[in-house]
Amino acid sequence: MLAPSIPGYDYGKVQRSPVTVDEFKRLQSVVGFTDDDRQALSDAGELFADEAEALVDGWRKIIGSQEPLSEWFFGPDRKPDDEYKAAVKPRFVQWVVDTFTRPFDQTWLDYQEEIALRHTPAKKNKTDGVQAPPLVPLRYVLAFAVPVIADMREHLVRKNLPVDEIERLHAAWTKAVILTLTLWSRPYTKQDLW
Amino acid sequence: MLAPSIPGYDYGKVQRSPVTVDEFKRLQSVVGFTDDDRQALSDAGELFADEAEALVDGWRKIIGSQEPLSEWFFGPDRKPDDEYKAAVKPRFVQWVVDTFTRPFDQTWLDYQEEIALRHTPAKKNKTDGVQAPPLVPLRYVLAFAVPVIADMREHLVRKNLPVDEIERLHAAWTKAVILTLTLWSRPYTKQDLW
């Protein structure tokens, strides 16, 4: 599942995040993320082992249907850069797998910072050598939490799990997504306000 | 329900937000907020007409139990400033009522910007004339989405509603909370990155 051969997927090979494991433990406490949630994410990872790409396809369909979400993948001709989209996709799928399976340690924190930077002028487009807009604005990154959270619920419901089990897995996913987006907001934020 | 007599509650009397109704419509589209969600929020508002304070009490209990969340209410002696907490509370309760009942128009956008500013050095402490820390860091504002979203689900479950009805009301609440926090992130964000 670790797929280290994805171009531009540099997990474990990026600079240190300014966010420490101790700080992240405080954030985990705020969202109530426990060992049970870690287990639930792992269980969800097994349940969706063959569906990470299908999840991403669903989200990209939403992205593709709304220009305020899709225009960050446009080339200089203001049309979708299909090569760029194709290059990003396996990393997006791998983000799903990593969220389910990776421990939330310093290496994981470092990579969340890297992903965040790749949405900002500091690093956007550089991994893939493309000429798309230099930014995905923070407001769209944050608002996209809702489709990512809601869509997972629909996928869980379709698996005909008991209601309590849907709730357990969905709660863990919701916490993981909000924690991730909280980390991704960091390089967008003014000095000392994050 | 409008309670215009709350000290420091300046709905309709604050400066214009840089976020326009048109921009907000794009964000509503991203989270999939529809007229049905608006109706669901209104229905939830009736269901919780007498419980907005109980909801806030639950969240404040979480805040009070974790210093990374509560220290922004401390006075210069590093102890909770109880007068400050008491002054903020009715406005927090009114935020719940407003989220259920107010149209998401320019006046509402303006007030979300004002609330956001009151969490940053631009305006924190000024409304109540207190000497607490000058900031609630963005990471804690965003991460607190989880207790606010999860807790509402528990309250809905306790009302013994049909599963579909819980889902309908909770989905609308989730969208409203994420939209709100997205707006609140604006004054924290670096120039041109929001």
Image: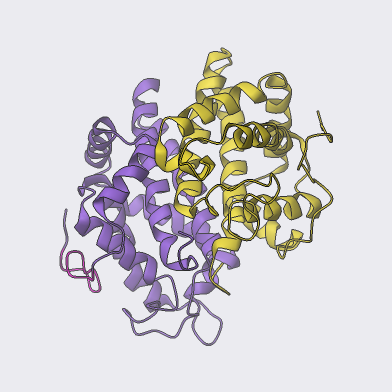
Chain colours: A yellow, B purple
Residue at image position (57%, 54%) is: A182
Quarter of the image with the N terminus of chain A is top right
Q: Does the magenta stretch include residue B110?
A: no
Hey, which quadrant is residue A166 in on the image? top right
Q: Is residue B68 left or right of residue A8?
A: left
Hey, which quadrant is residue A36 in on the image? top right
Residue B167 percent across, percent down from the top left: 39, 27
Residue at image position (61%, 49%) is: A179
Q: Is residue B12 magenta?
A: yes
Does residue B65 show up? no
Looking at the image, is A76 positioned above or below residue A182?
A: above
Does residue B47 show up? yes
Residue at image position (20%, 59%) is: B107
Q: In this view, does A54 lie to the left or right of A145?
A: right
Is most of the magenta stretch helix, strand or loop? loop
Residue B1 percent across, percent down from the top left: 16, 53
**Front residue of this view, candidates A20 and A6:** A6
Residue A191 percent across, percent down from the top left: 57, 74
**Front residue of this view, candidates B134 and A71:** A71
Quarter of the image with the C terminus of chain A is bottom right
Magenta region: which residues?
Answer: B4-15
